[in-house]
Amino acid sequence: MSENPDIDFRQLVADYYQPLFRFAYSLCKNEDEACDLTQQTFVVYAEKGDSLRDASKVKSWLFTTLYREFLRIRRRGANMSVQEPEIIESEAPMVDPGLVDKLDGKSAVAALENIEEAYRAPLVLFYLKDLSYKEIAETLDIPIGTVMSRLSRGKVQLKKALLNS
Amino acid sequence: MDLNKIKERLATIRPDCLDPDDPEMAELLALVEEDLELAEWFAQEQVFDRVFAQKLESIEAPEGLDDRIVNAMTEAKAKQTAEAAEPVEETVTEAPATEEPLEEPEKVVSIESEELEAAEAPAAQSEPEEAPADDVGTAVPFCPEQRRPWWQNPSLVSVAAAIVLLVAVGMIMFDGPPASANSDIDSFHNHIGTHHNSSAPLDHQSESLDELREFLASRGAPSPRDLPAGVDALPEVGCAVIQWQGQQVSVIKMRNGDHVSLYVVRKAIFPSDYHASDPVPANVGTVSIVRWSNDDLLYFLVRSGSVGDIETLF
């Protein structure tokens, strides 16, 4: 941290608020809640980030914190929990890329809404490309193999959702 | 491995992360090359992924959110500093809301049948090296002694002094970058050399450097600032964001007879030995690389041919 934390905060926010907002929006599906969640993530950093020694871990720390905050808030609000997904063995249907091209960001998130919770977060992080597979596993606190299997199965569900919409 | 398993694995490959140096990926890509039907399927999968990723990336945070966040962070920090400065006697008996430990996320238990074969290696199942939030989210029970600043605690000061001494001795004894630093920069040179020679697609095409900067910034990738005049004068073609060891690398393609690629990373990912601001040339196979740093970024300009061709730009 420099002597003027405001400067560091500005740089940190400039570097990461957009990708974090996208992740938050994909989880909350609501712009206001996504803003609050993104802000809360940075506030937690302001309060506790001094203890984070390894600068290269800041990004995955922020994503992890955002996801934990999301789970915490949601648990309080709706008493919900992440359910173990059903295992779907069917093959992914072919989707015309032209169909996807017609979507905008919000309708892409709406399509993700139809995917089981456990598949959605890894799939969103896969598409946002901000984190490596290993970092996705750390962020979601699941083994990397589970990340990979949920990606392929999540894509099956996503394509079905797009075809049905 | 049956066809479904192969497709399951191929489906998890990001479009901009085709790394032929990864043995598992090389094996999968070899299978794709041998099977025309599989190759068509994989190509469509990559197009689907690329287009869907672009849709998610087009989501923009509302205007002013960044300022709002910075203000909230500054306020929270100021509040925390003020609370820490309060006399011990005035300490409240309940931890403030901001001290609340981060709760553990819902633990999602993996089930064996869900794992992919490749991920069943013990290393993949082990705990992450670092659980970031745990590092900073641990609460301690209320205890006036622990509210005292650390520098007023003689034992902690002694420990801190010992650590400083050890670090100083360590730095003197092991002067220079870690042993892996050279191999890291070599590995990075190979990575960008391979990428430069491939026909990897661009994420965004534009001849405007400002537009490319804006695109890269919107992706959270390092965005180039002031460039040497010779490099700045080259016409841009487009840009992409690739990954190297979990770090984002910005790529800007330019034209200079042949294509020239500018790779930009955050300086902190390499040791300070590689932070020279003057251009440093290197040869990797058939490509030449010139590296320099400016502010908090490291730049790598890559072009096919000899170093002499590329040095004329500086």
Image: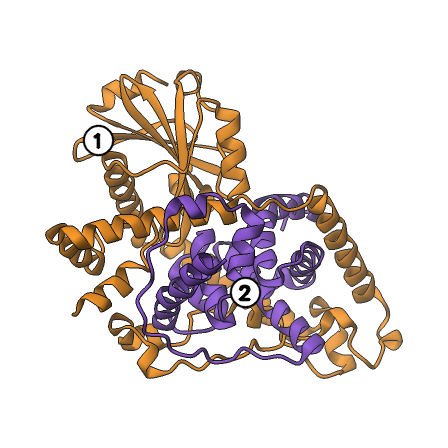
The residue lying at 66 percent from left, 75 percent from top is: B101
The residue lying at 31 percent from left, 26 percent from top is: B260
Label number found at residue A64? 2
Decide: few, some or many residues near mark 1? Use Cα within 10 Å; few <14, some 14-19, many ≥20. many
Q: Is residue A120 left or right of residue B120?
A: right
Q: Secondary structure at mark 1?
A: strand
Residue B269 can be seen, yes or no: no
Q: At label 1, which amino acid type do we have?
A: Val
Q: Which chain is purple?
A: A
Decide: few, some or many residues near mark 2? Use Cα within 10 Å; few <14, some 14-19, many ≥20. many
Callout 2 and callout 1 share a chain: no
**Image quarter of residue B172:** bottom left
Q: What chain letter is assigned to the residue under label 2?
A: A
Q: How many marks?
A: 2
Residue with the mark numbered 1: B287
Residue B150 in the image: state x and y as whole percent. Answer: 69, 69
Residue B84 in the image: state x and y as whole percent. Answer: 79, 66
**Image quarter of residue B136:** bottom right
Quarter of the image with the N terminus of chain B is bottom left
Q: Secondary structure at mark 2?
A: helix
The residue lying at 64 percent from left, 75 percent from top is: B155
Report the residue that reaches farthest toward the front. Answer: A164
Q: Nearer the viewer, residue B164 or A28?
A: A28
Label 2 to label 1: alpha-carbon separation: 38 Å
Q: At label 2, which amino acid type do we have?
A: Thr
Question: Tell me, what hue is chain B?
Answer: orange
Quarter of the image with the C terminus of chain B is top left
Q: Is residue B265 left or right of residue A36?
A: left
Residue B10 can be seen, yes or no: yes
